[in-house]
Image (cartoon, rainbow, N blue to C red):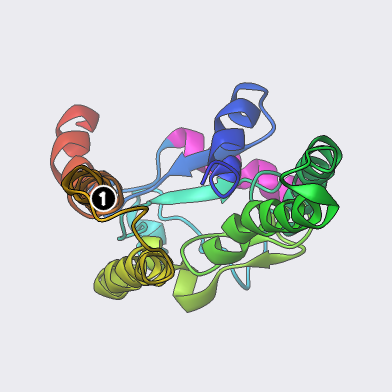
């Protein structure tokens, strides 16, 4: 779980270093904010703007009324996250984590070399899986360093940047959360038949639903739209 979310943790760190950025542009803004327009100009001057993929932002004037009016989904941002959400960068991070795990785990008698290598492979795949899956939700990249060269964003910008596809994204995330959990539950058996063990299993089952559905999905598909279309417009204006 921690390795699969490493990309999102790195965003915060790299944002503080100035290596990654996101610039908001939602339809209710009436036009792209000045900082977003400035970022677009910087990307153009650096060759990091692809007119075939990037949508020219409407600046709020009548002369450019035909231009893009803003992202309608739960994630209304132009993105430059080419390190934390690139397959190349996260493959390097995953390989490092896997090697450390293999070296530390191979000496343990209960794990052995085969178990340590299998664990390292799982950690590597979990680390790389985040940018690979995010290609369906928002901009993600194959190589790091330039936001246009190897960017991938399926489904007209991604499920999180297209309001028409929000229901599809919600159902997809439910499946991604529930199906692996059901497969894992089916492969396990209680340690014993005691009532105490049954209570603990039910407690863990409720905890999964609270975390996977209550916190994760509700925060994205309920709280995020509420912030975007209610709280942020009030504060912005």
- 177 on left or right of 218: right
In the picture as drawn, the residue positioned furthest to the front comes out as 193
* Residue under pointer 1: 201
| Magenta segment main secondary structure | helix
User: Relative to residue 222, is residue 176 depicted above or below?
Assistant: below
Q: Nearer the viewer, residue 52 or 129?
A: 129
Residue 171 rendering spot, x and y as whole percentages:
28, 73
User: Can residue 64 be seen from the camera position used here?
Assistant: yes
**Res 47 visible:** no
Give the percent coordinates (x, y) of residue 122: 67, 57
Q: Nearer the viewer, residue 202 or 24?
A: 202
In the rendered image, residue 114, in percent from the top left (x then y), is placed at 81, 57
**Quadrant of the rendered structure where residue 148 is?**
bottom right
Query: Residue 135: where, in percent of width, then height?
Result: 56, 66
> Residue 160's quadrant in the figure?
bottom left
- The residue under the point 72% across, 44% down is 110
**Residue lying at 56% horizontally and 50% vertically, measured from the top left:** 4
The stretch in magenta equals 34-46
Queried whether the magenta region covers residue 43, the answer comes back as: yes
For image coordinates 22% across by 49% down, the residue present is 194
When the figure is inspected, residue 214 is found, relative to residue 149, above or below; the finding is above
Q: Which is nearer the eye, 81 or 57?
A: 81
Q: Inspect the magenta stretch and tell me whether residue 44 lies in it.
A: yes
Name the one closer to the observer, 215 or 151: 215
């Amino acid at each position: 779980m921690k390795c699969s979310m490493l990309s999102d943790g790195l965003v915060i760190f790299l944002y503080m270093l100035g290596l990654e950025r996101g610039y908001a542009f939602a339809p209710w803004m009436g036009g792209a904010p000045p900082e977003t327009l400035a970022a677009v100009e910087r990307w153009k001057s650096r060759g990091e703007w692809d007119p075939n993929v990037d949508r020219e932002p409407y600046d709020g004037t009548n002369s450019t009324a035909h231009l893009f009016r803003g992202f309608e989904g739960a994630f209304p941002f132009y993105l430059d996250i080419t390190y934390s959400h690139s397959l190349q960068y996260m493959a390097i991070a995953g390989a490092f984590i896997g090697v450390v795990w293999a070296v530390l785990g191979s000496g343990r008698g209960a794990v052995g070399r085969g178990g340590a290598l299998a664990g390292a492979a799982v950690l590597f795949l979990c680390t790389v899986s985040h940018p690979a899956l995010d290609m369906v939700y928002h901009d993600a990249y194959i190589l790091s360093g330039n936001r246009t060269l190897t960017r991938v964003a399926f489904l007209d910008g991604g499920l999180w940047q297209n309001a028409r596809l929000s229901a599809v994204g919600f159902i997809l995330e439910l499946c991604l959360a529930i199906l692996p959990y059901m497969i894992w539950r089916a492969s396990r058996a209680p340690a014993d038949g005691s009532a105490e063990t049954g209570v603990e299993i039910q407690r863990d089952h409720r905890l999964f639903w609270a975390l996977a559905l209550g916190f994760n999905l509700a925060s994205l598909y309920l709280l995020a739209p509420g912030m975007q279309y209610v709280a942020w417009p009030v504060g912005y204006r």
